[in-house]
Image: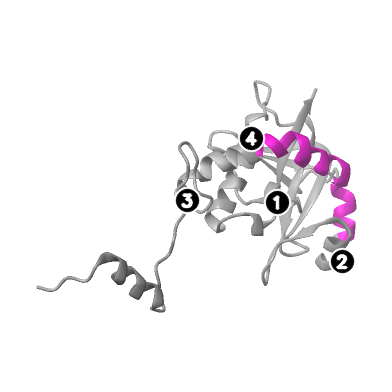
Amino acid sequence: MFRFPLTLVCAALLLAPSGCKIVKTPAAGETAAGDATGDAARAETRVAETYDAKLVPFITERAVPVADLRAALAGGLDTAGAAHGTRGSGAGAAWTFPVKGEGKVVEAALDTRARTLGIDTDGDGAADATLQLGPVIKGTALRDVAPFYNFDDFRDQIEFAKLARGLNDRATAAIALPEGDPKGRTVAFLGAVALRSATEPMLVTPVSLEVRP
């Protein structure tokens, strides 16, 4: 049987539309940028480098009091967002706002991995903001509130999502509650909230929480 030399076979493949793709082999200890096995390490590095140095200062400097945000939302979500928030890409994307507030704890769900506190910030006796204490956190507000976390800098949506999880984990690890029932106590908080409508309940992911006597 006649056999074509290997060099001729590869040359023919190079001329074909699908061609031979040359893939760079990572050096020892190096993970290729497109390799999903490196997601966790890259997310951990980004969180370590940016959470305290960039994200918390960004939220602290730009946080809108809950009462002021509520007043701005009365004029429309897009108007409030243009003044105080950051919007994700794509149709129907949420506006995400850095927020701060203070109020009395009127609801507490602490016997779950998705712990929450319902806070009354306007004195009417009803919860108007819910603080997520984790460790299970809904949403990606901490990632999306900051314009320096740009999707274009990530391999794909999966890697981008892992950054959000890392930021949520970092935030909840720092949240501690005193022993006993927190209901009736005053809480001051700083964090981020994502809204898709002006009337949507505020589900806040805090980066700091202070429970006062």
Q: Residue under circle 4?
A: 170
What is the magenta range? 47-72
Q: Which residue is mark 1?
A: 149
Tell me where residue 122 sits by quadrant. top right
Nearer to us of marks 1 and 3 is 3
Question: Neighbour class for label 4 at 10 Å: few (<14), some, many (≥20)?
Answer: some
Q: Amino acid at mark 3?
A: Asp
In the rendered view, tell whether residue 197 sits above or below residue 184: below
Residue ID for mark 3: 35
In front: label 4 or label 3: 3
Q: Earlier in the sequence, mark 4 or mark 3?
A: 3
Measured Cα–Cα span from mark 2 to mark 4:
31 Å
> Residues at badges 1 and 3 in contact (C-beta under 8 Å)?
no
Which residue position is annotated with label 2? 79
- Magenta stretch: residue 113 in it? no
> Is any part of residue 26 visible from this angle?
yes
Image mark count? 4
Rounded to the nearest whole Å, what is the CA distance between mark 1 and mark 4? Answer: 16 Å
Q: Amino acid at mark 2?
A: Thr
How many residues crowd mark 3 within 10 Å: few (<14), some (14–19), many (20+)? few
Which amino acid type is marked by label 4?
A: Arg
- The CA distance from mark 1 to mark 3 is 20 Å
Give how far across and how far down residue 67 sits, in percent.
Answer: 88, 49
Check the image and report above or below for 194 versus 110: below
- Local SS, label 2: helix
